[in-house]
């Protein structure tokens, strides 16, 4: 996450320098504007490139970033969501008599764009070393701006203290590329910490870009306990199911044995209970039945279906066979 604070400054009478942070909406003033912007022309130059952006107060159709450009009521040039590619020299010109004659001289505006980036492509940075790069994209030689214009890039903390004095940070500045890097090892307390890159000119703050760290703990520290808890919970559920199945099986077995022993059968809400006995016994009484056997084949008592007339019972008599 990057937030931006923007300021502008003027060097000399006719030359304007503006400093903005990337992704902000930029306004470039036209210092030679006439009463009517229909005479205004804006020209962009960088290196060997020269492009006419606005002519006669209207945007050109054959230009890049056309949708991000607009002309203000005061003839200023507005750039929506400026990028580091937008830096360069912008000139406001006034033409009268159908662009045949230029009125006055050019009003140049030098646009400098401050941009901060991270060595990590991830949104959330994990523990370990990280490098933040702050670069000022400017028209002209950075070393000349540093020496003769008093330009300076610095990294500060949330309290505004220069981090160059803190041994935890390694800070390197390159006047060749107008770049200053900050390298450090992230700690747990760095979560949501802000580091600001500032550009100053003669000790006056011109622009500031803030980088906020979103710290992400290593996977072993964050996710492993969750995995262990999940596995333990799954095992507990599995064991509970196994014990329940075993108990259910034992209960069915006990019920089955009880039913077989008592010969209990249920059918149509009527219970039949049958008790069968068989015995063979030799009895001698007064020598009358010396060799005869009394045989009791069985005695059966069966509960029958209750009828409306017999109060629910029928009794079968005992059958004896000799």
Image (tube, rainbow, N blue to C red):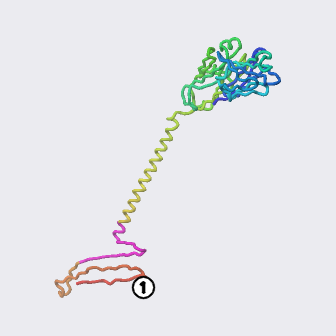
Quarter of the picture holding the N terminus: top right
Q: 264 above or below 43?
A: below
- The residue depicted at 60 percent of the width and 24 percent of the height is 132
The residue tagged 1 is: 310
What residue range appears in magenta? 257-279
Q: Nearer the viewer, residue 198 or 257?
A: 198
Magenta segment: does it hold 239?
Answer: no
Q: Position of residue 114 (x, y in %)?
A: 66, 22
Q: 231 above or below 23?
A: below
- The residue depicted at 38 percent of the width and 59 percent of the height is 249
Q: Position of residue 178 (x, y in %)?
A: 64, 17
Q: Quadrant of residue 303?
A: bottom left
Q: 281 above or below 202?
A: below
Q: Nearer the viewer, residue 78 or 93?
A: 93
Q: Position of residue 63 (x, y in %)?
A: 66, 25
Q: Quadrant of residue 250?
A: bottom left
Secondary structure at badge 1 equals loop
Instruction: Say whether residue 123 is left or right of residue 44.
Output: left
Instruction: Say whether residue 146 is left or right of residue 246.
Output: right
Residue 212 in view: yes
């Amino acid at each position: 996450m990057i937030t931006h604070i923007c300021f502008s400054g003027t060097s000399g009478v006719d030359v304007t320098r503006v400093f903005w942070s990337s992704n902000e909406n930029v306004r470039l003033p036209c210092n030679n504007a006439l009463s009517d912007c229909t005479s205004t022309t804006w020209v962009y130059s960088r290196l060997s490139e020269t492009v006419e952006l606005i002519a006669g107060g209207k945007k050109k159709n054959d230009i890049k970033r056309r949708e991000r450009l607009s002309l203000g009521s005061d003839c200023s040039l507005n750039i929506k969501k400026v990028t580091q590619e937008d830096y360069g020299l912008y000139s406001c010109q006034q033409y009268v008599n159908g662009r045949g004659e230029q009125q006055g001289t050019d009003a140049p505006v030098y646009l400098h764009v401050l941009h901060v980036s991270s060595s990590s492509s991830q949104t959330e940075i994990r523990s370990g070393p990280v490098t933040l790069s702050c670069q000022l994209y400017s028209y002209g030689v950075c070393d000349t701006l540093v020496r003769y214009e008093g330009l300076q890039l610095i990294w500060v903390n949330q309290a505004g203290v220069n981090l160059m004095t803190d041994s935890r940070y390694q800070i390197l500045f390159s006047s060749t590329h107008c770049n200053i890097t900050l390298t450090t090892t992230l700690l747990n307390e760095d979560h949501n910490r802000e580091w600001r890159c500032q550009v100053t000119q003669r000790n006056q703050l011109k622009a500031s870009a803030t980088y906020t760290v979103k710290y992400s703990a290593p996977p072993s520290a964050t996710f492993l306990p969750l995995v262990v808890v999940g596995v333990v919970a799954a095992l507990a559920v599995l064991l509970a199911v196994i014990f329940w199945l075993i108990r259910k099986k034992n209960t069915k077995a006990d019920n089955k044995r009880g039913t077989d022993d008592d010969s209990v059968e249920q059918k149509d809400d009527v219970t039949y209970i049958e008790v069968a006995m068989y015995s063979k016994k030799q009895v001698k009484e007064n020598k009358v039945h010396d060799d005869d056997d009394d045989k009791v084949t069985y005695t059966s008592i069966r509960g029958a279906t209750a009828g409306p007339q017999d109060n629910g019972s029928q009794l079968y008599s005992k059958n004896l066979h000799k």
